[in-house]
Amino acid sequence: MPIRKGKPGGRLLWNDDARGVTAWWHWDKQLGKGIIEEVWDTDHIVERNKALLASEFEREHMESPDLKYLGSVPFPILMDWVQKGKLGPDFMTVKDQKWIKQKLNDPQYKKLRATSKRV
């Protein structure tokens, strides 16, 4: 599930397989300027959430009653939520808890969750 803004191409600037991100530089003729584009591969996050969802019953008996692991959200999505003012820039400060819960419970975002229960 690579998250892309536009089509990657041009000159490869750098690649970080551990984080799943590649940066490209290309010239935009319409804008008349160079563009640096990051392409994120989030497949590993989605696959981990799927594996954790499959083992949900076992995890329920091992986790603290006060703290539950809900899943992982890829960095580009977190950045979008920060830009929309729903999360703080530290990614830990929730500014709109109702909106975040709606997103995590939305069937479109189910791949971000490692639990079948509603948030």
Image (cartoon, rainbow, N blue to C red):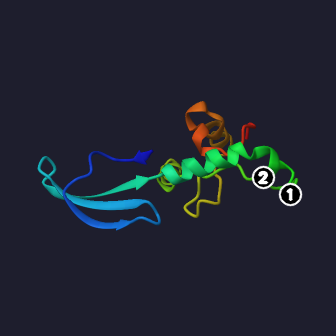
Q: Is residue 95 left or right of residue 30?
A: right
Q: Which residue is mark 2?
A: 68
Q: Nearer the viewer, residue 63 or 79?
A: 63
Q: What is the CA distance from the residue labelled 2 to the residue labelled 1? A: 7 Å
The quadrant in which the C terminus is found is top right
Q: Position of residue 27 (x, y in %)?
A: 15, 56
Q: Position of residue 114 (x, y in %)?
A: 68, 46
Residue 44 in sight: yes
Q: Nearer the viewer, residue 46 or 24?
A: 46
Q: Nearer the viewer, residue 75 or 100?
A: 75
Label for residue 4?
Answer: none
Give the amino acid type for the residue marked by disc 2 in the picture: Lys
Q: Name the element at disc 1.
A: loop
Label for residue 64?
Answer: 1
- Residue drawn at x 35%, y 61% is 22
For the residue carrying disc 2, how many other residues have a C-alpha within 10 Å: few (<14), some (14-19), or many (20+)? Answer: few
